[in-house]
Image (cartoon, grey):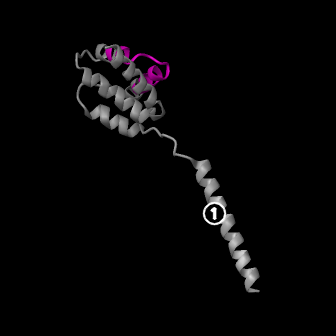
Amino acid sequence: MDKVSSLFRRAAWLVVSVACTVTATLAGSPAARSDATAYLVNVTVRPGYNFANADQALAYGQQICGQVGAGDEYDTMIAHIKSDFATSDDYQASYLITQAVNELCPAMIWQLRKSAARQEQLG
Protein backbone atom coordinates (compact mmCIF):
# COMPACT_ATOMS: atom_id res chain seq x y z
CA MET A 1 0.00 0.00 0.00
CA ASP A 2 2.88 2.40 0.75
CA LYS A 3 4.34 1.93 -2.74
CA VAL A 4 0.99 2.73 -4.35
CA SER A 5 0.49 5.78 -2.14
CA SER A 6 4.03 7.02 -2.81
CA LEU A 7 3.64 6.45 -6.55
CA PHE A 8 0.31 8.30 -6.53
CA ARG A 9 1.83 11.27 -4.67
CA ARG A 10 4.72 11.46 -7.13
CA ALA A 11 2.37 11.32 -10.09
CA ALA A 12 0.18 14.02 -8.59
CA TRP A 13 3.25 16.20 -7.91
CA LEU A 14 4.39 15.73 -11.50
CA VAL A 15 0.97 16.71 -12.87
CA VAL A 16 0.87 19.83 -10.67
CA SER A 17 4.43 20.80 -11.67
CA VAL A 18 3.68 20.41 -15.37
CA ALA A 19 0.43 22.35 -15.04
CA CYS A 20 2.22 25.23 -13.28
CA THR A 21 4.97 25.30 -15.90
CA VAL A 22 2.49 25.31 -18.77
CA THR A 23 0.42 28.05 -17.13
CA ALA A 24 3.47 30.23 -16.52
CA THR A 25 4.68 29.73 -20.09
CA LEU A 26 1.32 30.52 -21.66
CA ALA A 27 0.75 33.54 -19.44
CA GLY A 28 4.05 35.14 -20.42
CA SER A 29 4.57 38.72 -19.42
CA PRO A 30 1.52 40.79 -18.62
CA ALA A 31 0.12 42.94 -21.40
CA ALA A 32 0.59 46.67 -21.12
CA ARG A 33 -2.60 48.31 -19.95
CA SER A 34 -3.70 51.87 -20.46
CA ASP A 35 -4.56 54.17 -17.58
CA ALA A 36 -6.73 57.07 -18.69
CA THR A 37 -7.11 58.36 -15.13
CA ALA A 38 -3.35 58.75 -14.68
CA TYR A 39 -3.12 60.50 -18.05
CA LEU A 40 -5.90 62.92 -17.14
CA VAL A 41 -4.39 63.74 -13.76
CA ASN A 42 -0.96 64.33 -15.28
CA VAL A 43 -2.07 66.58 -18.14
CA THR A 44 -4.94 68.48 -16.56
CA VAL A 45 -3.17 69.39 -13.32
CA ARG A 46 -0.03 70.54 -15.12
CA PRO A 47 -0.40 74.14 -16.37
CA GLY A 48 -0.13 75.02 -20.02
CA TYR A 49 -2.47 72.62 -21.80
CA ASN A 50 -5.82 74.18 -20.87
CA PHE A 51 -8.05 71.40 -22.15
CA ALA A 52 -11.72 72.38 -22.01
CA ASN A 53 -12.64 69.08 -20.35
CA ALA A 54 -11.50 65.50 -19.79
CA ASP A 55 -12.98 64.28 -23.07
CA GLN A 56 -10.95 66.81 -25.03
CA ALA A 57 -7.77 65.83 -23.15
CA LEU A 58 -8.39 62.13 -23.82
CA ALA A 59 -9.15 62.77 -27.49
CA TYR A 60 -5.91 64.70 -27.85
CA GLY A 61 -3.96 61.92 -26.15
CA GLN A 62 -5.57 59.31 -28.41
CA GLN A 63 -4.63 61.46 -31.40
CA ILE A 64 -1.01 61.35 -30.24
CA CYS A 65 -1.25 57.57 -29.94
CA GLY A 66 -2.59 57.46 -33.49
CA GLN A 67 0.32 59.54 -34.74
CA VAL A 68 2.84 57.26 -33.02
CA GLY A 69 1.07 54.20 -34.42
CA ALA A 70 1.13 55.70 -37.91
CA GLY A 71 4.89 56.20 -37.64
CA ASP A 72 4.86 60.00 -37.52
CA GLU A 73 8.26 61.51 -36.79
CA TYR A 74 8.92 62.66 -33.24
CA ASP A 75 9.97 66.18 -34.29
CA THR A 76 6.77 66.54 -36.32
CA MET A 77 4.67 65.62 -33.31
CA ILE A 78 6.62 68.06 -31.12
CA ALA A 79 6.06 70.87 -33.65
CA HIS A 80 2.35 70.06 -33.91
CA ILE A 81 1.87 70.20 -30.12
CA LYS A 82 3.88 73.41 -29.80
CA SER A 83 1.65 74.96 -32.47
CA ASP A 84 -1.59 73.69 -30.89
CA PHE A 85 -0.68 75.09 -27.48
CA ALA A 86 1.12 78.23 -28.67
CA THR A 87 4.32 77.42 -26.85
CA SER A 88 7.99 77.27 -27.71
CA ASP A 89 8.67 74.84 -24.86
CA ASP A 90 9.97 71.51 -26.18
CA TYR A 91 9.64 69.99 -22.71
CA GLN A 92 5.93 70.82 -22.53
CA ALA A 93 5.37 69.13 -25.88
CA SER A 94 7.49 66.08 -25.07
CA TYR A 95 5.78 65.73 -21.67
CA LEU A 96 2.37 65.50 -23.34
CA ILE A 97 3.62 62.92 -25.84
CA THR A 98 5.24 60.89 -23.07
CA GLN A 99 2.14 60.97 -20.89
CA ALA A 100 -0.15 59.98 -23.76
CA VAL A 101 1.98 57.04 -24.84
CA ASN A 102 2.87 55.83 -21.35
CA GLU A 103 -0.69 55.99 -20.05
CA LEU A 104 -3.00 55.58 -23.06
CA CYS A 105 -1.07 53.33 -25.45
CA PRO A 106 1.83 51.77 -23.55
CA ALA A 107 2.26 49.04 -26.15
CA MET A 108 3.56 51.77 -28.49
CA ILE A 109 6.39 52.95 -26.24
CA TRP A 110 8.97 51.15 -28.39
CA GLN A 111 7.67 52.91 -31.52
CA LEU A 112 7.99 56.30 -29.83
CA ARG A 113 11.50 55.50 -28.67
CA LYS A 114 12.53 54.43 -32.16
CA SER A 115 11.11 57.62 -33.64
CA ALA A 116 12.88 59.81 -31.08
CA ALA A 117 16.14 57.90 -31.59
CA ARG A 118 15.91 58.45 -35.36
CA GLN A 119 15.49 62.17 -34.78
CA GLU A 120 18.45 62.18 -32.39
CA GLN A 121 20.63 60.50 -35.03
CA LEU A 122 19.53 62.96 -37.72
CA GLY A 123 19.87 66.03 -35.51
Q: Is residue 78 above or below residue 109?
A: above
Q: Position of residue 15 (x, y in %)?
A: 69, 64
Q: Which residues are magenta?
A: 61-79
Q: Position of residue 31 (x, y in %)?
A: 52, 42
Q: Is residue 107 above or below residue 48?
A: below
The answer to whether any part of residue 54 appears in the image is no
Is residue 68 found inside the magenta-colored segment of the image?
A: yes
Few, some or many C-alpha atoms within 10 Å of disc 1 (few <14, some 14-19, many ≥20)? few
Please name the residue shown 26% across and 20% down the image: 90
View extreme (bottom): residue = 1
Return the residue nearer the eye: 123 or 105. 123
Please name the residue shown 39% across and 18% down the image: 118
The answer to whether any part of residue 113 appears in the image is yes
Question: Identity of the amino acid at label 1?
Answer: Ser
Q: Position of residue 22 (x, y in %)?
A: 64, 54
User: Could you say whether the residue bearing mark 1 is in a helix, strand or loop?
Assistant: helix
Q: Horizontal placement of 17 versus 117: left or right?
A: right
Q: Horizontal placement of 120 versus 11: left or right?
A: left
Q: Horizontal placement of 26 versus 77: left or right?
A: right
Residue 51 occupies quadrant: top left
Q: Is residue 84 above or below residue 111?
A: above
- Determine the main secondary structure of the stretch shown in magenta: helix
Residue 120 occupies quadrant: top left
Q: Which residue is mark 1?
A: 17
Is residue 76 found inside the magenta-colored segment of the image?
A: yes
Q: Quadrant of the N terminus?
A: bottom right
Q: Horizontal placement of 81 versus 69: left or right?
A: left
Q: Position of residue 114 (x, y in %)?
A: 42, 24
Q: Quadrant of the C terminus?
A: top left
Count every numbered label the image shows and give the total. Answer: 1
Please name the residue shown 23% across and 29% down the image: 47
